[in-house]
């Protein structure tokens, strides 16, 4: 099954397979497994077994599933759990779940004892192709998404694709949105195959291809100073839509809407070709994803201007030119609303 090497500091492997991995020899003296209330009920016992077999002292903690748990209070609860358990610098944190679990557990690992190693065990399509890779960790504030966080690369990513069988369709669609985003960046051929037959997205080879694209970009720019910004295609509007909906609109569905908005706005600005715009809109609709924001652009502006990609009075927008080719467009904040209003045309 596909294995991808990520050449960051530290380097690590992404393993995509059926079933749980045979873990390599671990130097850890203790393991602290973090999951959420949904995933923990299904898989925490199985993953406990992997480490029990290795004879490593371990403990598991879960928190309520959902974006509402992605806050500093959950991080504090994990840190207190680490302290009570006695997690040392030779210990290991394991994130078992989707993007929220990975972000929160990874952030807690990054600040416990000034940083301890962690492993990602992603159980959602979105996490397998995107959030488990690249070391972005963090939590939300009331004012916006992911405003508090750190870069902390995992020591390994183990994706058991069998866990996708238990996902509701909405969660599959979340992952499809991130996969289509990745394909718009660098793989027009896979984009067309997924749109023609969405079940292609669940094949390990398709998951691996999207993971490989992200890994390659992360290797070039681990801390998002340049090319890694491309991975935020659709995300400036998406994060604002999530916040406006009080997270009733999930991340992947919001990313789909954000991509559609920037494709239409990019076309109006003379950047995105008509062929590319039409392909993105058709692709999103064909895979069951939305293309229109339920909120006026004016209502999204406050959150968009607080986006973490802002630098001074400028924000970096990612705008597609053609399928497989996007550009980073520095946008003055005073022009942002007018640019996105064109998305309503």
Image: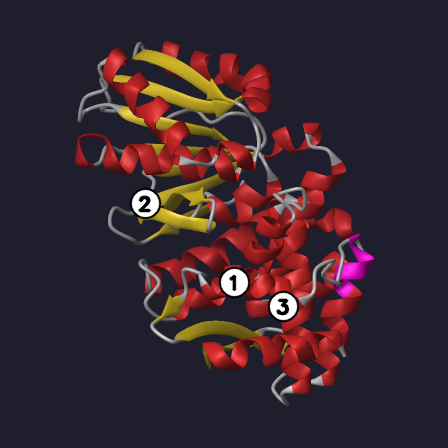
Q: Residues within 10 Å of mark 2 (few under 14, many from 20)?
A: many
**Residues at circles 2 and 1 in contact by the CB criterion of under 8 Å:** no
Residue 298 in picture, x, y percent from top left: 63, 68
Q: Which residue is mark 2?
A: 153
The nearer-to-camera label among 2 and 1 is: 1
Q: Quadrant of the N terminus?
A: top right
Residue drawn at point x = 40 percent, y = 70 percent:
227
Q: CA distance from mark 3 to mark 1?
A: 8 Å
Which residues fall within the magenta stretch? Answer: 283-288
Q: Are marks 3 and 1 in contact (CB under 8 Å)?
A: no
Outermost residue, bottom direction? 270
332 falls in the magenta region: no
Q: Which residue is mark 3?
A: 298
Q: Secondary structure at mark 3?
A: helix
The residue under label 1 is 302
Q: Is residue 240 left or right of residue 332?
A: right
Would you call the spot at circle 3 few (<14 residues within 10 Å), some (14-19), or many (20 or more)? few
* Residue sitting nearer the eye, 193 or 39: 39
Q: Main secondary structure of the magenta part?
A: helix
Of the image marks 2 and 3, the number of the one nearer the N terminus: 2
Q: Position of residue 338 (x, y in %)?
A: 61, 80
Display coloring: secondary structure
First reached walking from the N terminus: tag 2 or tag 1: 2
Q: Position of residue 172 (x, y in %)?
A: 69, 42
């Amino acid at each position: 099954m596909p294995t991808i090497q990520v050449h960051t500091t530290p380097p690590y492997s992404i393993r995509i397979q059926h079933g749980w991995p045979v873990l390599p020899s671990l130097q850890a003296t203790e393991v602290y497994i973090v999951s959420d209330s949904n995933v923990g009920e299904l898989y925490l016992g199985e993953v406990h077994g992997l480490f029990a077999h290795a004879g490593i002292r371990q403990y598991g903690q879960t928190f309520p599933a959902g974006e509402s748990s992605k806050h500093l209070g959950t991080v504090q609860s994990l840190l207190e759990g680490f302290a009570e358990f006695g997690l040392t610098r030779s210990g290991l944190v394991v994130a078992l779940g989707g993007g929220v679990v990975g972000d929160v557990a990874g952030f807690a690992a990054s600040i416990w004892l000034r940083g301890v190693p962690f492993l990602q065990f992603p159980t959602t399509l979105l996490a397998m192709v995107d959030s488990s890779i690249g070391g972005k960790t963090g939590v939300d504030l009331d004012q916006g998404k992911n405003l508090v966080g750190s870069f902390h690369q995992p020591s390994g990513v183990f994706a058991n694709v069998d866990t996708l069988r238990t996902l509701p369709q909405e969660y599959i669609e979340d992952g499809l949105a991130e996969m289509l985003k990745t394909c718009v960046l660098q793989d027009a051929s896979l984009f067309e195959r997924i749109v023609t037959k969405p079940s292609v997205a669940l094949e390990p080879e398709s998951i691996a291809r999207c993971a490989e694209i992200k890994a390659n970009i992360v290797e070039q720019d681990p801390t998002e100073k340049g090319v890694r910004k491309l991975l935020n295609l659709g995300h400036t509007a998406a994060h604002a839509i999530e916040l406006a909906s009080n997270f009733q609109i999930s991340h992947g569905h919001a990313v789909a809407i954000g991509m559609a908005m920037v494709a239409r706005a990019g076309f109006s600005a003379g950047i995105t070709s008509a062929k590319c715009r039409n392909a993105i809109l058709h692709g999103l609709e064909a895979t069951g994803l939305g293309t229109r924001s339920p909120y006026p652009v004016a209502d999204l502006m406050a959150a968009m201007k607080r986006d973490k990609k802002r630098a001074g009075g400028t924000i970096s927008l990612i705008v597609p030119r053609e399928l497989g080719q996007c550009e980073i467009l520095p946008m003055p904040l005073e022009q942002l609303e007018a640019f996105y209003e064109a998305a309503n045309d």
